[in-house]
Image (tube, helix red, strand yellow):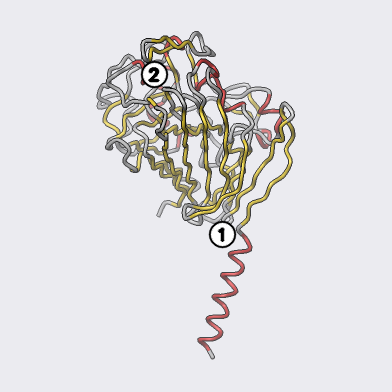
Amino acid sequence: MKKILYLLAVLMMTNCTTKKKSIQKEHWGEVKGKEVSLYTITNSNGMKMQITNLGCIITSLFVPDKDGKLDDVVLGFDNLEAYLAGHPSFGTTVGRYANRIKNAQFVMNDSVYKLTANEDGTSLHGGNEFRDAVWDAETVSNENGEGIRFHYFSPDGSFGFPGNLDVYATYLLNDDNAIYVNFQAQTDKDTHVNMTNHSYFNLNGAKDLIYDHRVMIDADTYTEFDEDITPTGKLPSLKGTAWDLKTMTRLGDKIHDIPLNGYHHCYVLNKKEGEMKKAAEVIEPNSGRKLEVFTTQPGITLYASNGLDHITGKYGIAYKPHAAICLETQHHPDAMNHPNFPSTLLKPGETYSEIVVYDFGIVK
């Protein structure tokens, strides 16, 4: 009898757990005649990700703390109009090319390709093409979680890049409180592709600045940059620099000793090309939240929102410098202009495919 009661209790708990999991869709507005939707994905633990097909933007991410209390750990807005007014890539999927391309141009196959310059003569984040586009979307479920598969078609010559590019970005939430992201693309001409997610994380729910966050990045070198914040091509050692994060470091201890008002560096990860490996770990001791970042990509840019100011986000919070950190897994900035960097070249018949996992937990 006890065994039967036990089995019934397990079955009831299983059913309750299953009922919690859901994917909900709501109308959020329209952009150029295309419907913009907001999707809410909830896992069996109550963790919740909200994401829209405008730019594949993660608008909210509710994650439990050490006491089980949910807080929204990403910056952003609570309405479509605020995103349309322009923003520093809160939560967006970045492409065709993440980070900076010097002089907004590159040479390929003896041709010079001039790109859209959107930051003092530099191409930043592909001119924000992917951020501002309305993507097609469908719900998906597989062994990596449940969520949304987004699709976007970038025509030949868009923002100066060659090739008709079919792009997919899949965002899944699983019951281990991890977000699994897969970027894929195919082209009909030689081109360059480098995608990332640009979420601004604050693991204390943006109650305080990031100074108490502890960060470790598994890297011994970084991409040195010049006055344009574009790489020189050199990959110097991090040892002895204020931005060395090889061991767990409290961000507030060194952030004011770093040029550009804080961390803004692309770290060269200690890993083989294409290898899926842990790249970074973040701990916020007050909430007890932990974030581990795994990726197939060769680098990760840590940006401490140094220039963030004069923006009021969700919950009426006035965002300030050092309100959050971006953990942008990617290929190196300006890689097509530096032969010693891992290649970002994509050819017809090939598939660009990169993965990042944001795995949330609690410090034990």
Q: Position of residue 352 (x, y in %)?
A: 42, 34
Question: Is residue 106 shown to the viewer in this render?
Answer: yes
In the image, residue 57 above or below residue 340: below
Residue extending furthest toward the bottom: 1
Q: Nearer the viewer, mark 2 or mark 1?
A: 2
In the rendered structure, which amino acid carries the disc numbered 1?
A: Ser
Please say if 354 is above or below 164. below
Q: Which of 176 and 214 lies nearest the eye of the viewer?
A: 176
Disc on res. 64: none
Residue closest to the eye, 69 or 208: 69
- Closer to us: 35 or 304: 35
**Which residue lies at the image location 38% right of the left edge and 30% below the top edge?**
253
Q: Give the secondary structure at mark 1.
A: loop
Residue 220 drawn at (x, y percent): 26, 31
> Image point 41% across, 22% down: which residue?
190
Residue 37 in percent (x, y) is at 69, 39
Q: Is residue 207 visible?
A: no
Q: For the residue marked with disc 2, what is the amino acid?
A: Asp
State the mark number for residue 44. Answer: 1
Q: Is residue 100 above or below residue 59?
A: above
At 40% from the left and 39% from the top, the residue drawn is 214
Secondary structure at badge 2 equals loop
Q: Residues within 10 Å of mark 2 (few under 14, many from 20)?
A: many
Q: Could you say where residue 233 lies in the image, as x and y percent from the top left?
A: 30, 16
On the picture, is 247 further left or further right than 208? Answer: left
For this rendering, which residue is in front, 38 or 162? Answer: 162
Of mark 2 and mark 1, the one earlier in the sequence is: 1
**Residue highlighted by disc 2:** 334
Distance, label 2 to label 1, CA atoms, is 41 Å
Quadrant (top left/top right/bottom left/bottom right) for the N terminus:
bottom right
